[in-house]
Amino acid sequence: PPQNPNPRPGPKPRAPTPNPHAPPPPPPRDTPARSGAMRRAAALIAVAVAAWAQGNGAEEVTWKTPNIVLNNGKWLKIREPFFGDADARPFPPLVDYTAKEDTATVIVLIAALREERLVDTVESILARAQHPERVRIGVVQQNAEGDADALETVCKSRGTPLALRDPSTPHVRLPDEDDWGHGRYTPESLASCPVSGQIRVYRMDASEAKGPVFARAQQIRLLGEDSAQEDFCMQIDAHTIFTKDWDTHMIQEWMMTDNEYAVLTTYPTNFKELPEDGSLPNINGHWEMPHMCKAMLMTPGVVRNAQAGAAANLDAPALCKLWAAGLSFSRCHAETDVPADPHLKQIFTGEEFSRAARLWTHGYDFYSMTRPVIGTYYGNEKGGKGGWHTKVEERRLAEKRLARLLRHKATLQEDLQAGVDVRGLLAGYDLGNRRRFEDYVDLTGVDTINHAYDHTPCRVNRWTPWEEEADKPYMPVESAPAALAPLEMSEELMVKLGIFRKEEGNGEESRTIPENMVVPGVEKQTPVPIIDVVRATPKATQKAMPNLRSGAARLQAAVPVPPRGGVADGGGSSSNKLALGVLALIVLSMVAFVIGSSRQAKQSKST
C-alpha cells in the first residue's frame, strides 16, 4: 500500500504486558522426520526458483557475466544449459570440420558496384587467412569502363600481369564466356599468376546494375559444381578487412553451434575497432558483439533491419532472430537451396528480412559470433563511385513480390480476386516448409501478415524445431530453383561495346539491329541467342573465343556502328536492295512532282 509521504509523529506503541496466569505454550508439533521433509521440499523449491531465474535472466547480471544479451538497455543472461534433456535439438553436422579445418574449403562471395576498396578486400582475404590455399573468392563485378578489375589488379600487383587473348576485349563478359571470367586470358599468363585460379569474376557493366539483391543472385554462378562445390560460403561487403586466421576462426565458430543449418550473421564491427596487426579486438572490455534483434515495418512486405543490438562474453555463438547481408557464413547448401531472388530488382530496403524469412522457414538458424573476425567500412568511408539507376516500375513489381512472399493479407486478397497464381510466381524463391512462417512472426514480432510490429526479447531462449511433414535434413530441398539462365546483355550495351553475337551452324558472326534502329520496310534480321547452355566450360570458351573476337573485329571494320536512329548499309540481302530501290524511286518521283508543281506555279503567276 502507498505510504504517507509526510507522516505525523504519534505516540510510541506500548509493549504488551505479560500475563503471569497464562498457560505455558504447547510443545512443537513437528517431528524430526517431518522437519527433514520440509527442509528437503524447501531446498527443491529454492533450486527450481534459481533455475527459473537463471533461464529467464532474473539473476543479477554484471558487465563480466558470461553469455549476456542487451535487451531494452538491460543485460539479460542466456539460458544455461540452453537445451534440456527433453528439448528438441538442431541437426548436427555430418562431418567434423574442426578435424579437417585446414582443408575445408571456403568461398567468399562479394557483390561489388564500382567499389574502390574491392581489391584491398580481396588482398585482405588472402593475406590474413591461415590456409589461403583453401580459400576461393567469387566477385560479381559491376564496373564501368576504366574501373580497376579485381583479378587483373591482384595479379599485376604480384608482378605477374594477365594477358588478354584479344586486347580489344571489353570489361564485361562476352557471349559464350565462362562465368568465372578466366577464358579471356592466355593460359600462360594465368599459369604465371597462381592466385588467379582462386579468384572468379562474373563481369557486368555498371549500367546493368539493379540493386544488391539482383547482384547477389548472380553469386551462385561462382560456386563449384557437384562434388567440387565448396564446403562453406561466406558473404561480405566489398569494403571489408579481415583479422588473422579468419578462416580457421569462422569454421571453429560454426562448429560450436553443432548445427548443420547454422548461419553466422551480423553487421560487422566498424573497421576502426580492429587493431592494425590483425588481432581480435576486445570491444568494450567484455567481447561485445553486434546482435541482430529489431526491425521496422516500412510498406507492405518491406521490412528494414534496425541497428544491431549487442551480446557479450559469449562462450559459444548465440541464437538471434534476423539475418544480415554484411556477414553471412554457412554451409554452401544455404546458397544453392535458398539463394537470393533475382526477381527482386531495385530492392535495397527489404532484402534482409525477406531472405531471413526464407532461410528460417527452410530450417536455417541465425547466430551471433563470439568474436569479431572482420571489420567493415561504413558511411562515406566505403569508397564507392555511386549507385545504380533506379527504375520505378521494376521496384514497384519487386515490392509487390515481397508483399506476396511475406503473406501480406490485403495483397493476397487482391491476388485471390484477380486469380493470381502466387505460388507459381514465387516458385523457387518462396518460403520453406520446415518451419511455419507464423512462428517466425512470433519470434521476431514482425507481423507482415497484418502489417504490425510487437517487440520481442533480443534474447532467444529456445530453438524452434522443424515440422514433421517437411523436407528431410541433409538433402536438397525440393523447392530449390533451377539453374540461372545466362544473363543477356541489352542490345544498346552490345552496340556501345561493339560486341557481336555468334551465329550457329556456319561459325559466322552477325550483328542484330535493335528494334529502334530498324528502318520501316527493311527486313529485320532474326536475333540469334547469345548462348544455349547454362554454363559454358572454360576449356570450350577458350577455344571458341579467338574466332569470335577476330570475326567481330573484321565485321566492325567493314560495317561501322551507326548512330542511334539510323542503320549502316552493309550490303544486305537481295530483298533489302529491292526495297531500297523502290524507296529511291518513290523519293525521286516525289522530287520531280515538287519541281513540276513549282514551275507551274511560277508560270501561272507571270501570266
Image: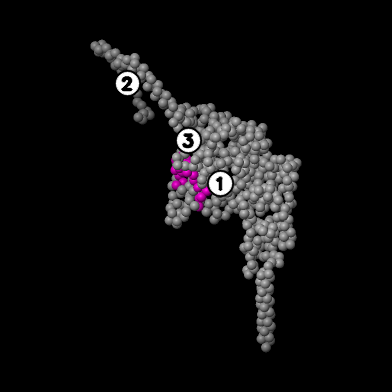
Please report the residue visible at 67 percent of the width from the left and 65 percent of the height from the top. Answer: 566
Whether label 1 touches label 2, CB < 8 Å: no
| Mark 3 / mark 2, whichever is N-terminal | 2
Relative vertical location of residue 604 with respect to residue 178 in this rendering, above or below:
below
Residue designated by label 2: 11
Disc 2 residue type? Pro
User: Which span of residues is magenta-colored?
Assistant: 425-449
Label 2 residue SS: loop
Disc 3 residue type? Trp
Whether label 3 touches label 2, CB < 8 Å: no
444 is within the stretch colored magenta: yes
Badge 1: residue crowd in 10 Å (few <14, some 14–19, many ≥20): many
Residue 497, image x, y percentages: 68, 56
Q: Which of 235 and 349 lies nearest the eye of the viewer? A: 235
Residue designated by label 3: 463
- Horizontal arrangement in the rendering, residue 509 relative to residue 43 (left or right): right
Q: CA–CA distance between discs 3 and 2?
A: 61 Å
What colour-coding does the image apply?
Answer: one colour
Label 1 vs label 2, nearer the camera: 1
Please report the residue visible at 57 percent of the width from the left and 32 percent of the height from the top. Answer: 96
Q: CA–CA distance between discs 1 and 3?
A: 25 Å
526 is within the stretch colored magenta: no
Disc 1 residue type? Ala
Q: Quadrant of the N terminus?
A: top left
| Mark 1 / mark 3, whichever is N-terminal | 1
Q: CA–CA distance between discs 1 and 2?
A: 79 Å
